[in-house]
Image (cartoon, rainbow, N blue to C red):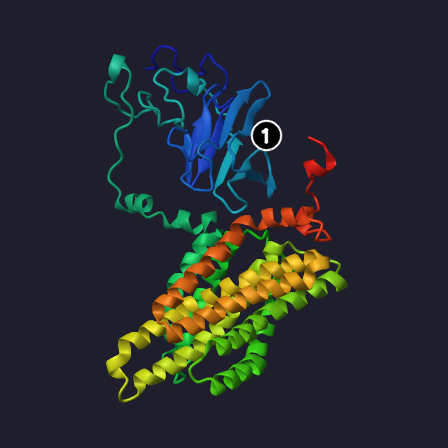
Amino acid sequence: MAGPGMAGPGMAGPGPAAGAGQLSVTFDGNRRVFMPGQAVRIGRGTENEIVIGYSSVSRSHARLSWTPGGWVFENIGQAPTFLGGQPVTRFTVTQPADLTLGSAHGPVVRVEPAPGTQGTAWGAMPGYAPGYAPGYAPGYAGAPGTQFGPGPGGWPAGPPPAPEDLGAALQILIPIKNWMHNPGWHQGLRLLVITYALLPLIFIALFLSSTSLSTPGWAYALYVAPLWALGFWWLIRPGPIRKLEMVVGACIIVWTFVWLNVVTIAINDAIVKSNQNLSLPAAIGVGFNEEITKALPVFLAGIILLYWRKTKLDARMWMWLGTVAGLTFGVAEAALYTSQYLSIINSPNGAGGAVPIVLLFAERVFVDGFQHALWAGISGFFIGMGLNYPRRRFLLIALGVTMAALLHALNDWGLSTLGVWAGIGVQALSLFLFLGYTMSASAIQRQVRRNRMFRGESIVMDAFTDTHETGTA
């Protein structure tokens, strides 16, 4: 027997067709149906009707509103929304649409006009709960013939709970199917976590039977170097890495590695053999030799782009590419030195000094490339300045390489003559200079542009309008 205002089985209700104006919103396999006039807010905050717990999604990301023309989607947060791969801020939902939130690979929400059915509109039914699909509204009698107990006010209390289903419970608690189709797998951070969690085990599987003592140095230095490269990119903020920058970076890596093995090692051997105690002049010679090894491919790449491609890059990009050259140098050096350290441990008298040797191994693997990247990044910034401001080109480049070479020399000489704390002091000074340039690179370029000592334009300043020079507000 139908209650007041409700239609019984087979009878049409007094309102419009059920489903008229309804909107279906589906996320992560969960579907909800909304009626005209209901608030439909989407975002990371728990106050939203559709809560999406992704950091890339705004707390109040989007809103769906009913208008005479239908449901209208509006992006109200700072993070973007994509429809068909293109950013969208507002549109009328006339057909099913898959909306990607936050980024092109973010979570996907499906919105679609719900298909109509016969009977009374759900919003007109007593006991209707906003946001629930038909049959799930507390206080509403569902399918005909179902027995319900009395609810408040004499209305049915709703369907009884379904029998316990262990399989369904496991699917809720461990939603593997939903995970497999989740676009979050395409996000770079998750891929990075997966890669770095598995690589050490892969190293063991691949190199467990290797007899070369340089293998651990290569494996773990290459493991750490990409993380440092990402960290430097975040600190320097050189801009997007496009195909051109990737090609230039690859050429710098190859050049640095080849030059190191063909030229740099031979010169260092000659310097060290004539100065067994590594005097300060000898350390300066080694410093210049190694810093030129890292700076030369960066400079040559910039000259080639400037004169053959007529292309300028921001000095910050050259700073980052300098760190790439430094990391390449550090990886090769780590493999060389770790081979020597491990051979000492394997010697009959080496077990007693294993702790310092292992610590030196760790320093080479985890820090060596970082040190070289700091010094090469400083010289790379000055190389970029020299490429963009030709009047003082060689003075700028010489200044950057000299700063890096002196820091390098003080580090090597201090460690060999004064001890570890001297090396720590030089490392702290190197960090101070490097981070200072990452924070003020653009400001330095603006000041150089205004200074009459320099001529030429920096690529970062091409679109910059100096209000002091033009007199415009």
Pick the front one: 308 or 171: 308
Q: Residue 388: where, in percent of width, then height?
A: 69, 56
Residue 248, visible in the rendered structure: no
- Tell whether 139 sits left or right of 335: left
Q: Residue furthest bottom?
A: 348
Q: Quadrant of the C terminus?
A: top right
The amino acid type, in three-letter code, at marker 1 is: Arg
Residue 362: name its quadrant: bottom left
Residue 342, visible in the rendered structure: yes
389 lies above or below 107: below
Residue 138: name its quadrant: top left
Pick the front one: 132 or 417: 417
34 lies above or below 203: above
Q: Give the total number of marks visible in the rendering.
A: 1
Pick the front one: 437 or 91: 437
- Tell whether 193 sits left or right of 359: right
Q: Residue 204: where, in percent of width, then height?
A: 36, 74
**Residue assigned mark 1:** 90
Q: Residue 430: where, in percent of width, then height?
A: 47, 61
Q: Residue 169: where, in percent of width, then height?
A: 28, 43
Badge 1 marks a residue whose secondary structure is: strand
207 lies above or below 90: below
- Tell whether 411 sits left or right of 240: left
Residue at (71% x, 51% y) in the render: 457
